[in-house]
Amino acid sequence: MNRSILDYLEQSKEKFPNKTAFADVDTSCTYSELWERSKKIGSELSRYLKPGQPVPVFMDKSVDTICLFLGIVYAGCFYVLLDTKQPKARLHQILNTLDADVLITSKDYDGDREGLLFDKPVYDLQELEKGEIDEKKLAEIRNHALDIDPLYGIFTSGSTGTPKGVVVSHRSVIDFITYFTDIFGITSEDVIGNQAPWDFDVSVKDIYSTLMVGATMEIIPKQYFSFPVRLIDFLCERKVTTLIWAVSALCIITTLKGFEYKIPSRIGKVMFSGEVMPVKHLNLWRQAIPDAMYVNLYGPTEITCNCTYYIIEREFLPGEVLPIGKAFPNEKVFLLDETDNLVTEPGKQGEICVSGTTLALGYFNNTEQTRQAFVQNPCNPFYPEIIYRTGDLGLYNETEELCFLSRKDFQIKHLGHRIELGEIENAMDQVEQIIRSCCLYDDKSSKILLYYEGAVDKRQIQKRLREILPAYMLPNRYYAVDKLPLTKNGKIDRKMLMALYKGEN
Ligand code: AMP
């Protein structure tokens, strides 16, 4: 029985010592090298740190960074990757919340170290690798480790303005990744092309699927997502078979007509999450690589990556809703209505709730918000059963597949009607030449705002939307933009659009 993700590293190292485990554009490491480097780092770190502590990492994603992550885990601690490009103020909020004893960066980091305002020791990865492996110390740490110990922390934006640090245990990752690799047939033959930033939990699937089955992970530089030719060349040259990407990243290839250049035909698995996948873009992918498996994955960071999946096995037309499907094994995903009653009948909406081993441990150093989000299952008055309330609305379709409706906060009351802004975006998917769109609501003036990419004028859009939506759902303002802004996690940046709107109105 494995209780640490290090068990998987060690097993893959036994089976495939000389195989490439992780590679970036500059370098790569085999399973043996990864194992040795991380044990050295872990031994050195254990001289300064007690197990259980958070270790902030101030580095970009790379082969070095994965060695460091696993080194931190060998020291019995957990890692928190901090985006080096994020605003200083946000970084300070995170560092204050963590109150960590050390911060680790790399000698290659050429940013402003003083500006970090971290008044405790800052180590370079390279210094940590100089010593020898201390087998005795590592064994002692390992013997005392529990599977519920934290493995990583990921900061997500908090509605109060302070980012929340979701802390996830080894057990949650082991549970989820075991089913994930098994259901989608991810094996040692696979080459996973990593798109997601490593402070975003989509990357957890890339990293731990790789380690668990002894696959290879190719780290794709962020800049390649602005140059589809380079991106597609990279996918072909590195023989990538598996993409577990944000929706926007897949849409970039289709929007920039990447498949007209070349088809990365070794790709056999295309999985996406984070937002609603526009069917129009999905269909372009399916036309280009028809034999691949396509999967819609759903879930928030707080439940460890995803809690439901839907393998696309039939044609969908633009405007049709792609289900988010069914729960992964060992997870309970259910709907609660406004009075906390279980929703089971098709067509009735409720809040998507989740329970099971994959629930995060909570928000670091934030008992109050942990208590609000991770609550007792209101349907179980008998013994403690913690559930996570996602804040997302869903419903079952006629064939009992779960469908995502919208965030609770994107449901509005307009002219007395309840409207899901997502439904308008979905209708926009049926307007020819629309690339992507985003709907917002201005409460003050009671206006539905539509931002869109695509060479179509307002009149054409209105004409088509009138055929699909009731009059009260038609947008009141239309804004064509060259490119919809994206968050660094690759989702449409609604906050930025709203700020833009407010600045102009
Ligand atoms: P994050 O914690 O950043 O991964 O964001 C999770 C949120 O993204 C969910 O609560 C949903 O609102 C949204 N989301 C994730 N996957 C999907 C999906 N397949 N379809 C629609 N929305 C999604």
Image (cartoon, helix red, strand yellow):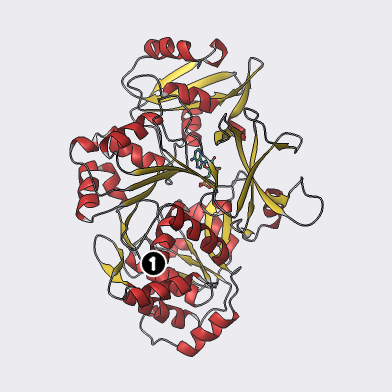
Q: Confirm whether residue 239 shows in the render.
A: yes
405 sits to left or right of 83: right
Q: Confirm whether residue 83 shows in the render.
A: no
Label 1 SS: helix
Q: Within 10 Å of the Cα at label 1, are there few (<14), some (14-19), or many (20+) other Cα atoms? A: some
* Residue at the left extreme of this rendering: 261
* Residue at the bottom extreme of this rendering: 136
Q: Residue 410: x, y in percent?
A: 58, 31
For disc 1, the marked residue is 66
Does residue 361 lie above or below 500 as drawn? below
Quadrant in which residue 26 is drawn:
bottom left
Residue placed most toward the observer, 425 or 498: 425
384 sits to left or right of 463: right
Does residue 239 lie above or below 123 as drawn? above
Residue placed most toward the observer, 497 or 181: 181
Residue placed most toward the observer, 100 or 62: 62
Q: Residue at x 49, y 61 (%)?
A: 178
Q: Residue at x 27, y 40 (%)?
A: 289
Amino acid of disc 1: Ile
Does residue 45 lie above or below 259 as drawn? below
Quadrant in which residue 15 is drawn:
bottom left
187 sits to left or right of 121: left
Q: Residue 344: x, y in percent?
A: 67, 35
Q: Residue 160: x, y in percent?
A: 63, 45
Q: Residue 431: x, y in percent?
A: 38, 19
Q: Is mark 1 within 8 Å of ligand 1?
A: no
Does residue 303 lie above or below 42 as drawn? above
